[in-house]
């Protein structure tokens, strides 16, 4: 792992929820799928904003490993938070279908 990636992953367990939120956002923007597992773990954060930012980041990464944990979170999360989780799952499915159609050409 790069030192930037390692540092951001470490920040996912910071005591400050704002730091965790920013780390999740940065990991999503980096586009490095090595962040998928740490972000999946962050879906169970105590702070709803951190959980939703982790869901968003997983959607940005588009890795199918995140679908099952996102589905579980969707069922557990309160109604007003479900849109973000649904969007993340749709982003992953879109990236999967794009990858499959690209492989068939």
Image: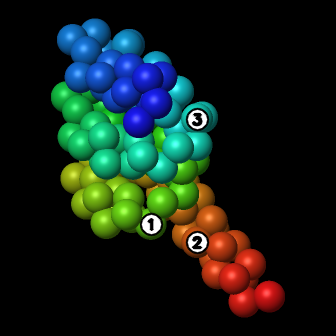
Residue at image x 54%, y 57%?
62
Q: Sort mark 2 into few (<14), some (14-19) or many (20+) by Cα contacts within 10 Å.
A: some
Residue under circle 2?
Answer: 96
Q: Can I make out residue 103 in this image? A: yes
Which tag, 2 or 3, sits closer to the chain's start?
Answer: 3
Q: Residue furthest top?
A: 16
Q: Position of residue 4 (x, y in %)?
A: 48, 23
Q: Sort mark 1 into few (<14), some (14-19) or many (20+) by Cα contacts within 10 Å.
A: some
Residue at image x 48%, y 60%?
63
Q: Can I make out residue 84 in this image? A: no
Q: Residue furthest right?
A: 105
Q: Sort mark 3 into few (<14), some (14-19) or many (20+) by Cα contacts within 10 Å.
A: some
Comparing 11 with 55, the one in front is 11
Residues at marks 2 and 1, CA–CA distance in whole angstroms: 7 Å
14 up-or-down from 63: above or below: above
Residues at marks 2 and 3, CA–CA distance in whole angstroms: 19 Å
Residue under circle 1?
Answer: 64
Comparing 90 with 79, the one in front is 90
Callout 1 secondary element: helix
Q: Position of residue 92 (x, y in %)?
A: 54, 62
């Amino acid at each position: 792992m790069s030192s930037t990636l390692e540092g951001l992953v470490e920040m996912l367990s910071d005591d400050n929820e704002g730091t965790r939120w920013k780390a999740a956002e940065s990991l999503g923007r980096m586009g490095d799928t090595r962040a998928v597992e740490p972000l999946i773990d962050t879906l169970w954060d105590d702070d709803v904003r951190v959980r939703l930012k982790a869901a968003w980041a997983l959607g940005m990464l588009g890795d199918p490993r995140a679908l099952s944990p996102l589905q579980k979170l969707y069922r557990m999360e309160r109604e007003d938070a479900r849109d973000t989780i649904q969007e993340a799952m749709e982003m992953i499915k879109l990236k999967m279908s794009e990858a499959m159609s690209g492989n068939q050409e």
